[in-house]
Image: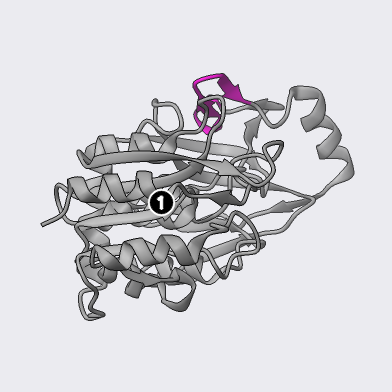
Amino acid sequence: MIKRLKSYYLLADGAVFSFFQLVPESVIRTKQGRVKLHNWRGLIKLWFINRKVRLPKGPVYLTVHSSYRGYYHWLLESIPKLLEAKRAALNFTLLLPASYTEVFYADTLRILGVERVERLLPDTVYYVPQGILPYSVETMGNYSLSALQELKTTVLAATATVAPTVAPRLYISRRKASRRKVLNEAEVEQVLAAFGFTILCFEDYTFAEQVQLCSNVQMLVGLHGAGLSNMVFLQEGATVVEFRKFDNGENYFFQQLAGTLQYTYHLLYCTAADEQQQVQDADIWVDVDALRAVLAQHSV
């Protein structure tokens, strides 16, 4: 769905407001409730301490980002909104935080043919004459199958000239990451190799190459992290195995994503090196016997 707006204000963190009240469609919804970044007092304070910028009249400005940044949120939440605006044949200028400097932002926008982008600076209140705000009534992590299918079809078609090859079984290593690693990865990779897995780091590939690699994959294994977002590009009826630290049951987004895509999903709880750390930070030890048992269920 798309909300059309006139004469409103925008912050780089994605907060959209008018008369110092947040526009409801811009507020992130989770199972625990709405994530309100600012109340009316906070917005008044920001109004007085931040500089004000009036965007030029004429363009229709599109906002698809939120305060949650990173590859997962961009690919699975922001890009579907952008595609919805394009599907509605709307001629827009995209508003995007200046802090979005990672290569995948530019890569996806180029692949999707988005050329007009206005960068939003921090500590600035923007007056927007007219704009559009795609939104979902679902809570975060409750995916629309039709939106995911549109994402897959559009991006696969746009990257069709890129043709890296990979075996139908893929393991995403995080050995190059700064945190959240598999501490016994050599042992894990030995088991995976015995079942015919290709082992690679997505950091070594462009976004287009990652997409086309995954399009050939029938079984994906990886540690909880942004790389698993690429499961959206797997073959129909794929299988996904996720490693993650045991926690209180929150933020099981990849399990929900796999379910929406109608994949077979296996969750392997792993022992953390530091049980006090959050899932997003903890290094883990994988139970290789449990992994071997899961893989044996899908052996050819």
Query: Left or right of 16: which side holds 93?
Result: left
275 magenta-colored = no
Residue under the image location 48 percent in, 49 percent down: 286
Q: Residue at x 49, y 21 (%)?
A: 31
Left or right: 276 as drawn, with respect to 253: right
Q: Is 19 or 298 nearer to us in this picture?
A: 298
The answer to whether residue 29 is magenta is yes
Tell me which residue sits at (63%, 27%) in the image.
22
Q: Mark 1 points at which residue?
A: 288
**Quarter of image, res 181:** bottom right
198 is higher (above) or lower (below) than 292: below
Residue 227: x %, y % from top left: 43, 58
Q: How many marks?
A: 1
Which image quarter holds the C terminus? bottom left
Mark 1, secondary structure of its residue: helix
Can residue 242 be spotted in the picture? Answer: yes
Please state the horizontal and vertical placement of residue 97, each as a whole percent of the image.
63, 57
Residue 55 against residue 133 in the figure, above or below: below
**Quadrant of the frame with the N terminus:** top left
